Image (spheres, rainbow, N blue to C red):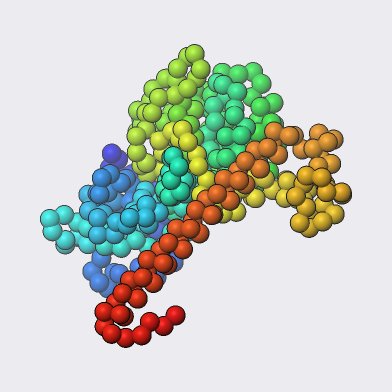
């Protein structure tokens, strides 16, 4: 774990707080004022583990940054989306016994939320208050365009800015051609080729990741190596990908916020085998090119099947729009619709339970039940 007091990171803000190096702003200062009056201390969560977290804060006695271990259970929630996660801004009660306690969380500006693995429709927050979502894909094996599209939808939905980084550029001779292919499925997104081994593209990457950056991708794409390069130190353990298929091993096992010497902070995340979407507008933004084509259709409610004057079908027929990309778009749309239906059912169930509880309470008191 890093030593907060030994690191120097800067964000462009005039809050005057030592925490400005971790993203604290004058706006957060104002938001936190009532909590400060209650004797609580602002902190940023850098790691969460089994009902506790590591949080960096300004020591009230010395005025210097330090990391404390705090209990997160008082603000825990059955809904994983509302539980404390890496990147959250928290109000910590340092006087609580037997250990400091997270008493409240500040509202999140952004959040990377994925559907949990399996058939459940619950969401899981991977990182909060992120400015840039860095999607890493390795050039050591042919990039999976469909998976990158899925990561892009996840990133856009978070509210942060996506950035695609193609790692291990020193291992291939056609990195620029592959980058062009990826740019074709990432409208409006910067795509970089980087080599941690030679340093190619690293300076450009640093310039593209101010503020808080969350690093996501599959195992074996070089996320831990990239983290070490950006941090300028061996802060993460690294394992080699399997030579046979370039599939990685889970080196990173938890999400951790790491300060960067050139400014900003990085949230490194474990490799994601399954990337389930959690609804929202991310798919539409990731496939903005298809949305633009749809605007040219003769009918505003065109289903892009057999309708006359369909611009999407015309693009498919002349090859302007690859069938693979259209299939990926439709697949992610169906996932979103499924999540939305499950979410609506969950909300309806919660409302029914609440109404039954109210009815039972009123009847027990002998009064009428009014709808």
Question: Residue 41: image x %, image y %?
Answer: 27, 62
Left or right for 256, reference 320: left
Identify the residue at the far left of this view.
98
Would you identify the image quadrant in which residue 262 lies? top left
Q: Can the viewer see residue 156?
A: no
Q: Quadrant of the N terminus?
A: top left
The residue lying furthest to the bottom in this view is 367
What residue is rendered at 32% in x and 86% in y? 367
Q: Where is residue 85 shown, x and y percent of the image? A: 36, 50
Q: Quadrant of the C terminus?
A: bottom left
Relative to 195, 127 lies left or right:
left
Position in image of residue 291 (x %, y %): 72, 50
Q: Quadrant of residue 91?
A: bottom left
Residue at 59% across / 27% down in the picture?
143
Taking the view exactly as shown, the residue that stands out farthest to the top is 244
Task: Give the residue drawn at x 30%, y 46%.
Answer: 48
Q: Is residue 314 visible?
A: yes
Q: Nearer the viewer, residue 360 or 73?
A: 360
């Amino acid at each position: 774990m890093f030593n907060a007091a030994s690191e120097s990171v800067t964000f462009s803000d005039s809050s005057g707080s030592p925490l400005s190096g971790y993203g604290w702003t004058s706006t957060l200062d104002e938001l936190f004022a009532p909590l400060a009056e209650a004797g609580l201390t602002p902190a940023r969560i850098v790691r969460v583990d089994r009902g506790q977290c590591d949080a960096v804060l300004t020591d009230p006695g010395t005025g210097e940054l330090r990391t404390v271990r705090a209990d997160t259970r008082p603000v825990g929630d059955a809904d994983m989306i509302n539980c404390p996660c890496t990147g959250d801004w928290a109000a910590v009660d340092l006087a609580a016994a037997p250990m400091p306690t997270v008493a409240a969380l500040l509202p999140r500006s952004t959040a990377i939320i994925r559907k949990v693995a399996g058939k459940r429709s619950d969401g899981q927050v991977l990182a909060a208050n992120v400015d840039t979502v860095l999607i890493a894909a390795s050039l050591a094996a042919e990039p999976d365009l469909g998976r990158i599209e899925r990561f892009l939808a996840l990133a856009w939905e978070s509210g942060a800015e996506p950035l695609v980084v193609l790692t291990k550029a020193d291992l291939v001779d056609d990195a620029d051609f592959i980058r062009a292919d990826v740019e074709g499925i990432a409208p409006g997104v910067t795509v970089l080729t980087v080599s941690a081994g030679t340093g190619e593209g690293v300076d450009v990457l640093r310039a593209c990741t101010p503020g808080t950056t969350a690093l996501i991708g599959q195992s074996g794409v070089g996320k831990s190596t990239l983290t070490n390069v950006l941090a300028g130190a061996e802060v993460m353990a690294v394992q080699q990908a399997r030579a046979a298929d370039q599939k990685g091993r889970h080196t990173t096992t938890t999400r951790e916020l790491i300060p960067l010497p050139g400014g900003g902070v990085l949230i490194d995340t474990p490799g994601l085998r399954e990337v389930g979407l959690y609804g929202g507008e991310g798919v539409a933004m990731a496939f903005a090119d298809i949305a633009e084509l749809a605007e040219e259709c003769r009918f505003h409610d065109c289903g892009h099947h057999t309708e006359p004057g369909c611009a999407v079908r015309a693009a498919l027929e002349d090859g302007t729009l690859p069938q693979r990309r259209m299939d990926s778009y439709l697949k992610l749309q169906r996932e979103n619709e499924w999540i939305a239906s499950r979410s609506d059912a969950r909300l309806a169930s919660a409302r029914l339970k609440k109404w039954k509880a109210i009815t039972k309470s009123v009847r027990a008191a002998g009064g009428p039940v009014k709808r």
